[in-house]
Amino acid sequence: MKNKLIIVLSLLFAALINAQIKIEKIDKIGLEKIINERNGKVLLLNIWATWCIPCREEFPDLVRIYREFAKDNVEVVGISIDFPEEVNQKVIPFLKKQKAGFVNYITGFKNDEELINIINKEWNGAIPATIIYSTDGKMVLFMEGKKTYKEFNEAIENQLK
Amino acid sequence: MKKIKTLIITTALAVVLTNVNLAEGLKKADSFSLKDYNGKTHSLLDYKNSSAIVLIYVSTQCPVSNAYNERMADLYESYKGKNVSFIGINSNKAEDIEEIKKHAAENNLQFTVLKDINNVIADKFAASFTPEVYVLNDKQEIVYHGRIDDNRRKENVQVSDLSDALDEILAGKKVTNPKTKAFGCTIKRVGK
């Protein structure tokens, strides 16, 4: 009986995640709004792509971070830099497989350079990249390359102190 | 009071001038030696008579780098008769010499590809992604750094940044856009 209940709940949870996954395009104005309108929340922004192996490898840790900190005034947002026409074929299936509950967008920027420079003028464009913004929308940490749950966790905990 | 004012203005001017000099100053590339996939050692000094040297950090596995294989081969073909040297550098820890050799043959990459064991040269250049380009002039100063062009899809390219930079160098002009950016795969370094 207990096992059946667990299976039913798991299926319901998976169905809920799948139903929630919608990907919209994001541009300069949209990203600046997300960064600046913090409403007292810390922001973890992750730039990723389905073709990027380290991005895929670190993704489960981001999903875990989202689940653990959702109640703690932490917002997790992802921006995929896959081509917009690949959303249905590549991006959504990946997010479903990851059971990603957090909001993800697909790049709608004029070009790569526009997105890179809005985030960090010192950044050359290597992904994955994860950026932590304080509750007043200031970038407090820029992390390039694959990171671990521990690194994400520490970065957020430092902002919640 | 007047002296303090003068001192502040002089200091501010010195800071501005220093920044201008730094912005306009070109960084000379440190020479290095690496082996290609056939075991032959290449030094940057071997290419000192080139009008320009194109260093491209490449990967055998990165989909972005691979999307540029054909364009890299075409650029090499276009400029090899113009005294421009192309050198690929593979700094990824997981991509060994045999894999690099096979990849070059399969993708018709006829320019030299060097193996940067322990990413020593990537660290020297602070290279972070593939395909990342550095172009050196005949004094081996870095005159262009960034992307090959502005789109991962060849059919959507609007600006051919590397080609434009090479044409300007060969014409004896200053590179108009010496620094460009694009997304690429992180160079997988040792210990990371």
Image (tube, coloured by chain):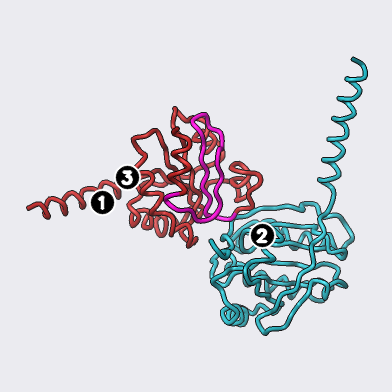
Chain colours: A red, B cyan
Disc 2: which chain? B
Looking at this view, is A64 or A7 the one in front?
A64
Query: Can residue B122 be seen in the rendering of this structure?
Result: yes
Q: Which mark is residue A20?
A: 3
Query: Can residue B148 be seen in the rendering of this structure?
Result: no
Q: Nearer the viewer, mark 1 or mark 2?
A: 2
Disc 1: which chain? A
Callout 1 amino acid: Ala
Q: Quadrant of residue A60?
A: bottom left
Q: Nearer the viewer, mark 2 or mark 3?
A: 2
Q: In this rendering, would A143 be left or right of A76?
A: right
Residue position for label 1: A14
Q: Nearer the viewer, mark 3 or mark 1?
A: 1
For the point 65% across and 56% down, the residue is B150
Residue position for label 2: B127
Q: Quadrant of residue B174?
A: bottom right
For the point 87% across and 63% down, the residue is B139
